[in-house]
């Protein structure tokens, strides 16, 4: 990316900051912890004092969770979260990247290692003495929510599955959460798309690089996202073909974050992929508005809570899941108003940040409990694991309710 | 392709846009409020100042509204709609099913209250949260202003000096308060006041220091969850009436105002999309057919039968003056009015004088319809004809024009008169 481009589109936006403090009102982290002084201070204010190649004197930007809400609410268009992500990267480069951050940011390694030995891996992750040891040696908090390996991979199921040929084709980007931990979510996404007349293609794919990016490992993140974009772009010959994903933070990475934060605006493949990538609920709502979504829904007489994750809000499309869920007869959906569950991908796993993440999530957990909901719908897998950790209630992707309402769970 | 279709798209999430959105949703329209970011509510004091100066200080907005120039927004909106808007807002804010049960807005168009600002000036307001009422200087003999050194956005002694100059017997208390951080703003304090134990401890320390007579003025930090309970508790614990004085942003009462309107919008089935700044639009004949917003990946098209433009005027950058001294409406490319002719002065040297440019805005007809397009109604600070910061009329214009814009739009859509 050219310097001028960077100045115009990212760092230069700090000049639009009028110090109105709207970002401060919305920041989940600074409102829960004094260790992060807030997006305005850490972003447009501090950025003026960050001189390239000089050692950073203030490390507080490391406590930014990267949720991105500050950029969303800024009425002046300052790219606060993106500026902070780059500052975090420079800070890490200067001070060194902990071994922990090199491990927990690679879902592919972890998934490939854990899947064949899932019972043992899951036992290990739940075994207190080992978790204490991991906290002491690696800095992964002993209580942090660890997903359970499913013991099978979604891509295996996909290879064995034949999607009926249809005039409309969609490329399914399932992400690592679906691949290693919740393969059934992917099966349900495929079933809902096929029910609506799509032929679903599942190309070879790997991590989008978001965990690497949010821990400041930009070079590795660029490699990951470019490899993924290359694989997805190869499927886009037909102009009408689009990509759809259910991991909302990973689709956001493809759409926007990699281009802005990693400086890949000029990458033509990534641009093509970004323009054609949809969040699953975004796509289904659009179909509904065109009268093309099947609405043969059976009633689901349950009360659920819905939490829109920060990264879903970063798509700047509102809350399509809420509108989709409202189509299901008898399903009572309580919208949660708390902004953030706290986990922010891998942030809440880190020993020094776990307590902050739990403090951030507290008001969401309290609202969920007060709602009397039996289950929590949420578009992001790491948020779902954190919500279950904080509320002891099951949490699933909104697509699950469509899957059930279509009667697809009964074959 | 990313595309959404609605009956109405409201552009802007400040008071005007949120009121218009909530009213349209209540009228049964499929409405979506889109905004580049969070709006002006978080920066303003949270009071509804209908008309404070015209140009002398206004005692009764209802009387003064009738004598405004014919091109003033209130003259276009009409006194009846202003009154209806105030009634609707009061009922909405106070509703048991509203955002903050018990947190009433108090006042009327008949008499302005006169409330201390952070610098101890007295500002006329028509409609104020219950947490402001005890500060009404018209009813006041003496008062105590309380500050804390940790909140550097509020200086009790500055406020008190000016109130004394205005003839009010004012004492001050400076209370040392420990928070977990060195740089605290009003929001940080408000979150503490949400905690009943914390505020009880605060009252216990403050009570013995109160010597003067009259109510106790605190910076506006009385909580974001249940401000009615905070006020009730403090008054009981201190044995005096308590009131809030607006602070520098972030404005805690302004955040509550946003929540009141957001709650009303959502309850009526309206949607809010924040982060969706309009980047372009497309016309069909004399209609705006659709707008494009910046979204992740690629733009999203919002098509609608009608649009309400509540984008904030010069304050938000929705109207700009370029380096060639040309003024532009940035969102829909609408015609402006009130811009001084080429060569005529736009500004005068005195900062606080009325600036020649200050009454510029989007040209509208009598029903707030933007000139030159058939399906755009304008509300809030983009309207021409007022100098709201001199008149203390900004929030009142936002409320009443948002309300009126919804009426006009709903009628045009065929949804009929709003219930």
Image (cartoon, helix red, strand yellow):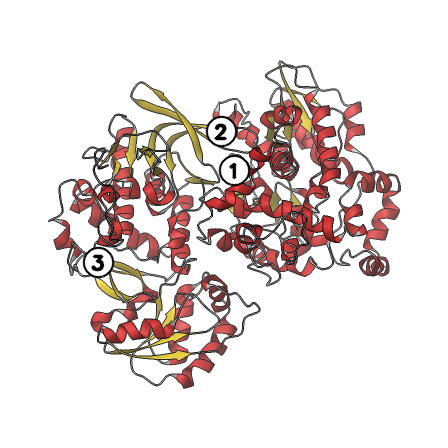
Q: Is residue B416 visible?
A: no
B318 to the left or right of A111: left
Badge 3 vs badge 2, beta-carbon distance below 8 Å? no
Label 1 secondary element:
loop
Q: Chain of mark 3?
A: B
Q: Nearer the viewer, residue A300 or A57?
A: A57
- Residue beneath the point at 48% across and 23% down: A290
Quarter of the rendering containing residue A213: top right
As drawn, the label of residue A316 is 1
Residue B357 percent coordinates (x, y): 25, 42
Q: In this figure, which residue is indicated by the disc labeled 2? A: B300
Q: In this figure, which residue is indicated by the disc labeled 3? A: B108
Residue A126 percent coordinates (x, y): 81, 54
B217 to the left or right of A44: left
Residue A201 percent coordinates (x, y): 70, 21
Local packing at callout 3 (Cα closer than 10 Å; few below 14, some 14-19, many 20+) is many
- Residue beneath the point at 18% across and 40% down: B76
Find the distance from the CA under tag 2 to the CA under tag 1: 9 Å
Local packing at callout 1 (Cα closer than 10 Å; few below 14, some 14-19, many 20+) is many
Residue B211 percent coordinates (x, y): 35, 86
Q: Chain of mark 1?
A: A
- Residue beneath the point at 74% across and 33% down: A223
Nearest to the eye among marks 1 and 3: give it: 1
A80 to the left or right of A174: left
Q: Chain of mark 2?
A: B
């Amino acid at each position: 990316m050219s310097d001028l481009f960077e100045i115009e589109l990212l760092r230069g936006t700090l000049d639009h900051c009028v110090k109105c403090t709207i970002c401060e009102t919305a920041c989940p982290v600074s409102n829960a912890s004094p260790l992060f002084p807030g997006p305005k201070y850490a972003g447009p204010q501090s950025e003026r004092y960050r001189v390239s190649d000089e050692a950073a004197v203030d490390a507080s930007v490391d406590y930014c969770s990267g949720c991105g809400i500050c950029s969303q609410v800024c009425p002046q268009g300052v790219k606060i979260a993106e500026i902070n992500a780059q500052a975090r990267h420079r800070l890490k480069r200067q001070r060194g990247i902990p071994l922990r951050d090199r491990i927990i940011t690679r879902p592919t390694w972890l998934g490939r290692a854990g899947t064949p030995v899932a019972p043992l891996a899951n036992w290990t992750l739940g075994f207190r003495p080992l978790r204490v040891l991991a906290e002491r040696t690696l800095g992964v908090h002993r209580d942090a929510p660890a997903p359970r390996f499913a013991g099978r991979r979604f891509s295996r199921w996909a290879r064995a599955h034949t999607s009926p040929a249809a005039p409309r084709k969609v490329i399914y980007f399932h992400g690592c959460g679906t691949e290693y931990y919740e393969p059934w979510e992917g099966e349900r996404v495929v079933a809902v798309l096929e029910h609506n007349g799509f032929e679903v293609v599942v190309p070879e794919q790997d991590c989008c690089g978001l965990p690497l990016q949010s821990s400041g490992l930009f070079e590795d993140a660029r490699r990951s996202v470019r490899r993924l974009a290359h694989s997805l772009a190869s499927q886009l010959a037909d102009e009408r073909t689009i990509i759809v994903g259910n991991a909302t933070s990973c689709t956001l990475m493809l759409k926007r974050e990699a281009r802005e934060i990693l400086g890949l605006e000029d990458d033509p493949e990534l641009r093509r992929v970004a323009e054609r990538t949809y969040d699953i609920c975004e796509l289904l709502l659009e179909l509904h508005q065109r009268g093309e979504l099947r609405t043969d829904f059976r009633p689901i007489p349950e009360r659920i809570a819905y939490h829109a994750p920060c990264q879903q809000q970063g798509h700047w499309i509102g809350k399509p899941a809420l509108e989709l869920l409202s189509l299901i007869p008898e399903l009572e959906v309580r919208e949660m108003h708390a902004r953030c569950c706290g986990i922010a991908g891998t942030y809440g796993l880190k020993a020094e940040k776990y307590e902050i993440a739990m403090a951030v999530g507290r008001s969401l957990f309290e609202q969920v409990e007060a709602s009397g909901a039996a289950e929590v719908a949420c578009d992001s897998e790491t948020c779902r694991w954190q919500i279950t950790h904080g509320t002891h209630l099951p949490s699933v992707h909104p697509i699950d309710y469509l899957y059930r309402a279509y009667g697809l769970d009964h074959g | 392709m990313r595309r959404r279709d609605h009956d109405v798209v409201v552009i802007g999430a400040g008071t005007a846009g949120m009121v218009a959105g909530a009213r349209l949703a209540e009228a049964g329209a499929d409405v979506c409020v889109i905004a580049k970011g969070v709006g002006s509510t978080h920066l303003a004091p949270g009071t509804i100042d209908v008309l404070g100066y015209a140009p002398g200080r206004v005692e009764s907005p209802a009387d003064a509204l009738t004598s405004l120039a014919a091109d003033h927004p209130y003259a276009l909106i009409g006194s009846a709609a202003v009154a209806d808007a105030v009634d609707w807002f009061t009922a909405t804010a106070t509703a048991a099913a509203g955002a903050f049960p018990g947190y009433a807005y108090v006042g009327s168009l008949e008499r302005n209250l006169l409330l201390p600002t952070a610098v101890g000036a007295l500002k006329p307001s028509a409609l104020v949260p219950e947490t402001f009422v005890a500060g009404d200087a018209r009813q006041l003999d003496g008062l105590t202003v309380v500050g804390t050194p940790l909140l550097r956005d509020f200086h009790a002694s500055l406020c008190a000096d000016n109130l004394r100059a205005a003839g009010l017997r004012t004492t001050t208390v400076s209370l040392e308060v420990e928070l977990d951080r060195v740089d605290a703003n009003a929001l940080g304090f408000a979150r503490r006041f949400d905690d009943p134990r914390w505020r009880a401890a605060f009252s216990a320390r403050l009570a013995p220091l109160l010597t003067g007579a009259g109510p106790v003025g605190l910076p506006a930090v009385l909580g974001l969850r249940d401000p009615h309970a905070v006020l009730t508790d403090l008054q009981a614990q201190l044995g005096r009436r308590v009131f809030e004085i607006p602070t520098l942003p972030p404005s805690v009462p302004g955040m509550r105002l946003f929540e009141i309107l957001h709650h009303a919008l959502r309850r009526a089935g309206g949607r809010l999309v924040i982060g969706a700044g309009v980047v372009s639009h497309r016309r069909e004949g004399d209609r705006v057919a659709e707008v494009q917003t910046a979204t992740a990946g690629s733009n999203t098209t919002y098509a609608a039968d009608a649009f309400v433009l509540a984008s904030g005027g010069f304050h938000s950058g929705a109207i700009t003056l370029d380096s060639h001294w040309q003024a532009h409406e940035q969102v829909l490319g609408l015609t402006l009015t009130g811009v001084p002719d080429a060569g005529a002065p736009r500004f005068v040297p005195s900062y606080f004088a009325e600036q020649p440019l200050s009454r510029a805005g989007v040209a509208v007809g009598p029903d707030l319809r933007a000139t030159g397009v058939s399906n755009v109604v304008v509300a809030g600070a983009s309207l021409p004809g007022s100098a709201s910061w001199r008149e203390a009329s900004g929030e009142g214009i936002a409320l009443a024009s948002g309300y009126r814009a919804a009426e006009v739009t709903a009628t045009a859509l065929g949804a009929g008169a709003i219930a």
